[in-house]
Image (spheres, helix red, strand yellow):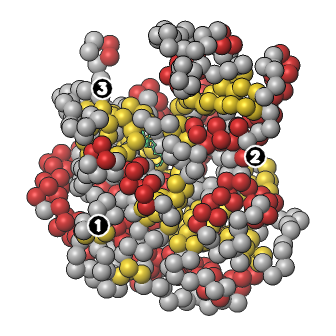
Amino acid sequence: MSNEQQVRIYNPSEEMVKNAAVSGMDGYRALCKEAEDDYEGFWGRRAKELIDWKVPFTQVLDESNAPFFKWFADGKLNVSYNCLDRNVNNGLGDKVALIFEGDNGDVTRVTYKDLLARVSKFANALRGMGVKKGDRVVIYLPMSIEGVVAMQACARIGATHSIVFGGFSAHALRDRIEDAGAVALITSDGQHRGGKALPLKPIADEALSLGGCDTIKNVVVVKRTGGDCNMVAGRDVWFHEACASQSETCEPEWVEAEHPLFILYTSGSTGKPKGVQHSSGGYLLQAVLSMKYTFDIKPNDVFWCTADIGWVTGHTYITYGPLACGATEIVFEGVPTYPDAGRFWKMIQDHKVSIFYTAPTAIRSLIKAADNNPAVHPTKYDLSSLRLLGSVGEPINPAAWEWYYQNVGGSRCPIVDTFWQTETGAHMITPMPGATPMVPGSCTLPFPGIQAAVVDETGTEVPWGQGGILVVKKPWPSMIRTIWGDPDRFVKSYYPADFQGKLYLAGDGAIRDVETGYFTITGRIDDVLNVSGHRMGTMEIESALVAHEKVAEAAVVGRPDDVTGEAIVAFVVLKGPRPTGEEAAKTIKELQNWVGHEIGPIAKPKDIRFGENLPKTRSGKIMRRLLRQLAKGEDVTQDTSTLENPHILEQLKG
Ligand code: WT7
């Protein structure tokens, strides 16, 4: 490594080391050793200490049906009780739980006592509709107090929720409702984003009309934007009306620790999203433990995770983790660029946020905005309340890390670069803010108790300094339990036979630093793209494209993008002649909108190129590596001798 490239190491401040839950590297190593010496004891002790159990568990880990692991299986609890009642019982009833800031800047504060009452009312309303333990409820809501309330209410009555991100299309919503066999849908008339009111209920209505949603008996509609809203008699009811006459108390449903708290759909390498099923007890334990260890949450903190509740980050670090810790947190309806790109910084200033957790793509877009308009530069705001920063969703490039560290954190706040996944439920590899020396671009070392490794195709660990496949060697409490309705796919995807079914396959490549053993994630090893921290399967986008009447064939790849991390590039063969000029531009728009309508705006290809064919081997296999080079605008340097039709490369250059 040359001098110019010398990595900089940032040590946590003495004050952080002194006060943090995990104090110094000695503290971190002691925890790791505790887990190594007595794995079940490590998790069992924390599960007893951090969770209130109705029926205590007697067994920590049941491996008898691996890889369908069970944690704390004979214990009973209620997740909503742990997030709400126990805080009220501990004297935190008047503490603010949620600070909701609307798109237009209006602020609503909800105390723990208020939140418990709101959740209880809605839980009673759901029960009144006949929703019961084990039923699935799909939630299609914008960022809102009601979104958190709906999730907590499901948890309270033992219904399994499945959130569908508000940016997904009617088709995507229909597919998820159908796969989950949901009995109820909770949505809103619309949402406010960036100063605009966007309708949501019409999309929900379209989804329900597409067929396959006969299981839905009730649709509950939150009134947010106002104005006309189609309500189907006998099926649709307003949220506020459903809650109006309900009692403010609601006996929780005590469920087994393994009871599915939620299903969350995520992209894999086939066209069909996977319903990742999570548990109640194990999931809650790691939500709480990571709030304590990674975020070092303290009673006076104001915590802000900018994720949407439609993603796992919003589940673990908005709805469950912070509330189970009795924290005060921000819930933000809007976007980082409205009314201007200083919105995040202004909100940190106004609400005295102390812990701020966001995505690299947001940071990169705000760097650009601040470069163009000094008035929205973070240093123009009073950000002195901050004491800890976090990053999640994709690798953070060192330049963005440094900018975040200096300009947002005032060179005083540690940054936790947290690697994890929908499937892992909570942080897996991350610095401990009062212990781990930080290296920009590296997520550093495993969370205490997590045993991560980098292996080759046979599952053998590779030496540090050599790239390989990221795996987890032991089951952990908040791990995925199965894929809803498809246990075979669960085993094949995550415990493949190549590793004798013994290692959890994350789907990412990684490399460990030769000296420190620090992990750096090198990107997905499957056909999954990461666009603005959102997971998109290339197959899903290809399926959407070929569903268009004009499209004969399509191949989708990613290319690096300054702001979104990766950008979607589609190579398309039309049924008719290859379009050029105006005609091509028109067709590109048409296909982009089509994909937006089929999946959602986040899946729209940024770049679409037309060819008379795709580059294929003589056996007809699409040469994706070659497409990736073309997508980047690079000259094709690799061997094209096996290529059946070399002349089409010229057409696809873009
Ligand atoms: C994929 C999981 C975890 C919540 C948000 C995304 C990538 C996530 C990091 C990080 C490098 C990261 C991985 C992972 N990823 N965090 N800190 N450094 N890569 O959840 O949609 O399930 O995506 O996001 O590729 O596999 P997800």
Instruction: Determine the residue positioned at 40% across, 42% down.
Output: 507
Residue at the spot 25% in from the left edge and 37% down from the top edge: 458
Q: Position of residue 138 (x, y in %)?
A: 62, 67
Q: Position of residue 66 (x, y in %)?
A: 29, 62
Residue placed at 82% from the left, 25% from the top? Answer: 576
**Outermost residue toward the right in this view:** 228
Distance from Cα at disc 1 to Cα at disc 3: 45 Å
Ligand 1 located in image quadrant: top left
Of labels 2 and 3, the one closer to you: 2
Is 526 on the left-hand or right-hand side of 65? right
Q: Residue furthest front?
A: 619
Residue picked out by circle 1 = 65
Mark number, residue 553? none
Tell me which label, 1 or 2, sits earlier in the chain: 1
Please state which amino acid type lies under the numbered disc 2. His
At x 50%, y 89%, the residue is 251
Residue of label 3? 8
**Label 1 neighbour load within 10 Å: few <14, some 14-19, many 20+:** few
Amino acid type at image mark 1: Asn
Kindly state the secondary structure of the residue where label 3 is placed: loop
Say the numbered circle drawn on residue 597: 2
Q: Is residue 11 left or right of residue 171?
A: left
**In what element is the residue under mark 1?**
loop
Q: Nearer the viewer, residue 579 or 604?
A: 579
In the image, residue 422 lies at what x, y percent? Answer: 46, 53
Q: How many marks?
A: 3
Q: Amino acid at mark 3?
A: Arg
Q: Nearer the viewer, residue 581 or 197?
A: 581
Q: Is residue 490 above or below residue 566?
A: below
